[in-house]
Amino acid sequence: TRNDGTQHLEALPTRPPTPARPPTPKNMLPVQTGVKAQEEEQSSGMTIFFSLLVIGICIILVHLLIKFKLNFLPESVAVVSIGILMGGFIKIIEFKELANWKEEEMFRPNMFFLLLLPPIIFESGYSLHKGNFFQNIGSICLFAVIGTAISAFVVGGGIYFLGQADVIYKMSMTDSFAFGSLISAVDPVATIAIFNALNVDPVLNMLVFGESILNDAVSIVLTNTAEGFFSQSNNATVSGWQTFVQALGYFLKMFFGSAALGTLTGLISAFCLKHFDLRKTPSLEFAVMIIFAYLPYGLAEGIKLSGIMSILFSGIVMSHYTHHNLSPVTQILMQQTLRSVAFMCETCVFAFLGLSIFSFPHNFEFSFVIWCIFLVLLGRAVNIFPLSFLLNFFRETKISPKMMFIMWFSGLRGAIPYALSLHLGLEPLEKRQLIGTTTIIIVLFTILILGGGTMPLIRLMDIEESQTRRKSKKDVTLSKTEKMGNALESEHISELTEEEYETHIYQRQDLKGFMWLDAKYLNPFFTRRLTQEDLLHGRIQMKTLTNKWYEEVRQGPSGSEDDNDEAELL
């Protein structure tokens, strides 16, 4: 036996070495050719046509709301209502077998995350008033990060324990926390509009606005943490405390890594446009801005970070530094283009939300929906009231109980929870449909009931300030388009020369911390200070464009040559 074994051992080296296996190629997306390619092109064309038709109808609707001064109605309510009506009309057409638009009316989550969501998030960061934002970054992060996490844990924990008690549909801890995270994304457009109209302190207004911007990104990162980390971890070999610590580390890596990537991209764009003067060719300048706007999203997603968090911080940094290196024409063009694209994207998502009532395969459980609505309201309350009470100890401008209640009541859920619910890869299909249906009902409940009831609530709670508003003829408007589209942001049109900027900084002796560091070193390094010649050239450029447009209007078929009309209008 030993000899046989020796022979066996000696024979081993003579065996030819096993060649190294080539790396497994990535699964390539199937490329359609021939007839299938033509069918896919036709289907995509119909989808594009249908989406543009829906957006066009909604634009007309929003215009009518503004024209007839229906200020009490949020645009999201009107657009969702139009979507519901169009969904019912399409269902009737399909029932009568006149046409089949089932594929066109279905909402694709990948389209939302790749095309629709980035412009919305970038525009919210780009239109931010940076001064109050950076001064209150601590309070804003407390509301956005800690508050959103509290809400997610309240909703997710409540669903998990109610399921274990057989009160509602039973779900795992991972799925419960993922649902709690996605449903915590709040869209407080109504709150911000009311705060503006009620002459609320600008610092408090920025606190709510900044929290709403970061809240969306934090909610998405929390959902990705639940979906990505917990699904990969081996819960059998790791204790609950270790799992929590590892999940926290995963979240912090996603949050701060993505924020750092977006900040770095924004600083690089500012540095490039400071030293490569493209102001005499606004088309190239605008093209570079569009490239840098989308660049961090693609890079972050490619290296498995959060593209949304990255593009948000990129928008904030580009607005603070890069924007002031642009020509006046590109500054105005950038603002208006971003607002228009973000409006179209938001409108598209809200319209498809209304359509989904008829196009989405539903799984409705009454007890699950009722408990989820209760937990969502409870999570928002546990978020707002204790954190506001805590912040009042450290703030000169206090958050009154009335303001806390308005912040709680008008915490509308919008487009992001709906899209996230469709993006979750839950199994079995029954659970995925239940989460999707419940999310749609919660979003519609907050938009239609809470959004529609915000204005009557203000009138009941705020009699004295309503009388003040009537005297000053200042109306409360819940139209985001009317509020943001009437005028340009004056702080975004920089006309300070280098000498004026230095004088302005020396006059500001109250700057502390990051604001002082930014004004003293970062702003001069990343932004170009205008000379008198640059300032004169920018004014001539704007005046030339204005005169050219005015001459074309005067010479057109509807133009008027009567100077008296012009004097009367002025």
Image (tube, rainbow, N blue to C red):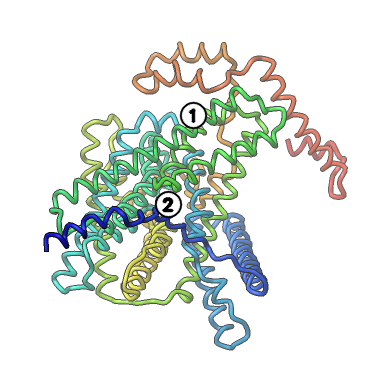
Q: Which mark is residue 190?
A: 2
Looking at the rendered structure, the kind of residue marked 1 is: Leu
Identify the residue position indicated by label 1 in the image: 267
Say how many tags the image has: 2
Between 274 and 230, the one nearer to me in the picture = 230
Between 477 and 547, the one nearer to me in the picture = 547
Looking at the rendered structure, the kind of residue marked 2 is: Ala
Q: Is residue 438 above or below residue 467?
A: below
Q: Is 330 on the left or on the right of 217, as rendered?
A: right
- The Cα atoms of the two marked residues, 1 and 2, are separated by 33 Å
Q: Residue at the far bottom: name it.
A: 96
Report x, y in % for residue 124.
48, 43
Between 539 and 458, the one nearer to me in the picture = 539
Report x, y in % for residue 66.
58, 54
> Image point 58% across, 62% down: which residue?
58
Q: Is residue 204 above or below residue 525?
A: below
Classed neighbour count for the residue bearing mark 1: other residues with Cα under 10 Å, few (<14), some (14–19), many (≥20): some
Q: Mark 1 or 2 closer to N-term? A: 2
Residue 110 visible (yes or no): yes
Report x, y in % for residue 118.
50, 49
